[in-house]
Amino acid sequence: MSEDFLQQDVRYVKGVGEKRADVWAEQHGVRTVHDLLRFYPRRYLDRTTVTPVRRLQEGPDSVTVVGTVRSVNVVPGNNQKRLEIILEGEQGGRMKGTWFQGVWWVRKAFDEGDRLAFHGTVEKYGRWHSMTHPDFDRLNDEGPLLDTGRIVPLYPGGEAMSNVGLTSRTVRRVLYDLFKEHGLKLTETMPDWIMDGYDLMEGRVALRAIHFPKTQQELSRARRRLKFEELFFIQLLLAQMHEQQEEVAGPAFDDPGAYTREFVREVLPFELTGAQTRALREIIGDVQTGTQMNRLLQGDVGSGKTVVAVAAMMHAYDSGYQSAFMAPTEILAEQHHANLQDYLQPLGLEPRLLIGSQTKAEREAALQAVRSGASPVAVGTHALIQDEVAFDRLGLAVVDEQHRFGVAQRAEMFEKGERPHMLLMTATPIPRSLALTLYGDLDVSKIDEMPPGRKPVETRLRAEKRRGEVYAFLNDRLEQGEQAFVVYPLVEESEKMDLKDAESGAQELQEKFPDYTVGLVHGQLSADDKDATMRRFKEGDIDLLVATTVIEVGVDVPNATVMLVEHAERFGLSQLHQLRGRVGRSDQQSYCVLMASYKRSQEAKQRLEAMARTNDGFEISETDLQIRGAGDFFGTRQSGMPDLKIADLTEDDEILEVAREAAFALIEKDPHLRADEHERLRRRYQEDYAEHGLGFARVG
Ligand code: ADP
Ligand code: MG
């Protein structure tokens, strides 16, 4: 197969044709022969990977079973219908597959007599072994599988794929013919010394073995090679950027002066923690070198990142520079602005807010103050980086919750002609494997210490039938003069319905707690109304604040000690952790109560259990990554997370490290490859990955 052949449209490949090509492209992005070869199996079945149904045991690890559907039943329940499938194993034994969601869809999808593979964790209910919401593959058109001694690859499928006959069996046939007809004359993309040094299987052999493995051993070598390759090219790009970026000049700040000192010593009513001091020192060190800073400030919710950022902004101002402070949403920008006002007014300084929902006059005034240099800090959303916002002398850009910014937006910051120092703040600790892949070499400061006197929040999981108890508890806290949040989920598609939930929840609470004031804040209120309600809560005029997730990040109400989350099963893990971070901001004991319906998906269960198990943001974040996979963790497109086809950042740290080492070594060592081969590879992989904005740090 030549390079040209690899770029050929998949519709001309034997056994594909127009209709299948369309579906394949749409469902899985398979457009060319190159894509086709990298349409990797999602799972392999053989005697060593399939557990006989009659030998099933309850346990935390996922297993695969193969069997025939004996019945499909919708079972009514107290709260919720469920769908049960009884599956009979190839060598006997019966088990259940159970669905609480998508009941009617699943009912339509399966028939008696279907042959299926289920993949999931096994629980035991009575005498039945059961999997809840198992992942499944349809094996109807497969011959006898497991008695042949073969390793059978199963491909990503779905309804649309099987409608045009693209079952695993067809995919295997297409690939088989392709290899047979065109052979394996693929050029090796790795230089010899990397092949030898890292003991890699040849690329063409690996591509064949990933689809048609003869042994498990061969398969695992093939997987290692292809994972290596995938990560290697990303790291090569990052290495290259890194090289180009070394010399980017940034503003050279002076030593911290009066504003910084006064802010830290006079304005703050507390001492910085050791971790805050360390982070601030690292920042101060960076910004005086004359090279652009790119630093990620990591710290759990409430660990005091913002305070450090404000000190850094004061340092900028001491040196004659302004700062931009960007938040992912308007309400967060507003909250930051309000906080900044509290911090800066004692110093006689005025931060300016720039958001889309301002009146024209407000905006004009703010723009003017920023343009003239009268204001030291502009706070806003990405509106800040739109063209019309001109700074007199921008020296520092602080980006809060950076992972929510699209890469394109981040890139724009660099096109403004100015090269401010960058301080990115995140409460979601990013595992090293992800950070490397997303940012390459970003310097990291960690705030791994909470302000003194904080007590860890106690987290409790409660089912609906214990609501009475929960309200009694809430009443106790209110009687102590403490305040509480009650949060409802807001799902975009049905915003109106959810709003009704929150509204009727607020009404119900007001009836249950007539002696206390209940407030309601949601996304459809005007910025002013939201702000007013938040302020009343902060000032203690409201005891119970019912909210949709608009309060997720940012508001600081130390007297609030209870975070009650309704329909907690609908929230993501990081979101729940953020919500929990709204309480526990004083020396009082705080509580997070997660109300969840008893029937939940496996994933929701894992999330809620993780919340009950730990308060540690780092552990939460690792668990979240494991549950969702890297792609969803940040949202591929939005975050610039490359769409990995085979490497898995939760597992492949070790391969990532060696691929990274090899990539950097290559750049050092092989200028010829860099000029020529590498350029070609770079272009190709840039198309694959960098359209999503691979690693933004110091780009340009
Ligand atoms: P983050 O941005 O990490 O969520 P903030 O900077 O907003 O955290 O700080 C959270 C709360 O903790 C604020 O009320 C802040 O005033 C307080 N705080 C920050 N640093 C300290 C400290 N060193 N000692 C006591 N309280 C602190
Ligand atoms: Mg914060």
Image: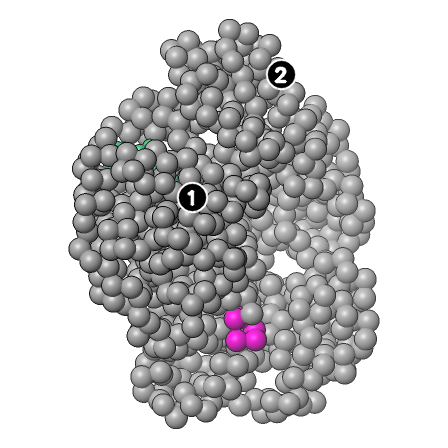
Residue 692 position in % (x across, y down):
54, 66
In the rendered structure, which segment of residues is drawn in magenta?
686-690
Which of the labelled discs sits on residue 638, or is there none? none
**Label 2: how many Cα within 10 Å (few below 14, some 14–19, many 20+):** some
State left or right for residue 455 relative to residue 181: left
Tell me the residue at 36%/90% (across/down): 671
**Residue to which mark 2 is pinned:** 507
Query: Would you place residue 191 above or below residue 418 in this image?
Result: below
Which of the labelled discs sits on residue 352, or is there none? 1
Residue 454 position in % (x across, y down):
28, 29
Q: Can residue 612 be seen in this snapshot? A: no
Depth check, front residue: 393 or 654: 393
Query: Would you place residue 498 above or below residue 98 in this image?
Result: above
> What type of secondary structure mainly makes up the magenta span?
helix
State left or right for residue 342 relative to residue 580: left
Residue furthest to the top in view is: 515
Is 519 covered by the magenta stretch? no
Identity of the amino acid at label 2?
Answer: Gln
Disc 1 on helix, strand or loop?
strand
Q: For the residues carrying marks 1 and 2, which lies nearer the camera in this image?
A: 1
Depth check, front residue: 125 or 189: 189
Q: CA distance from mark 1 to mark 2?
A: 37 Å
Identity of the amino acid at label 1?
Answer: Arg
Tell me the residue at 33%/72% (across/down): 248
State left or right for residue 695 relative to residue 588: right
> Which numbered disc flags the more N-terminal residue, 1 or 2?
1
Depth check, front residue: 78 or 661: 661
Tell me the residue at 52%/45% (across/down): 363
State left or right for residue 469 relative to residue 191: right
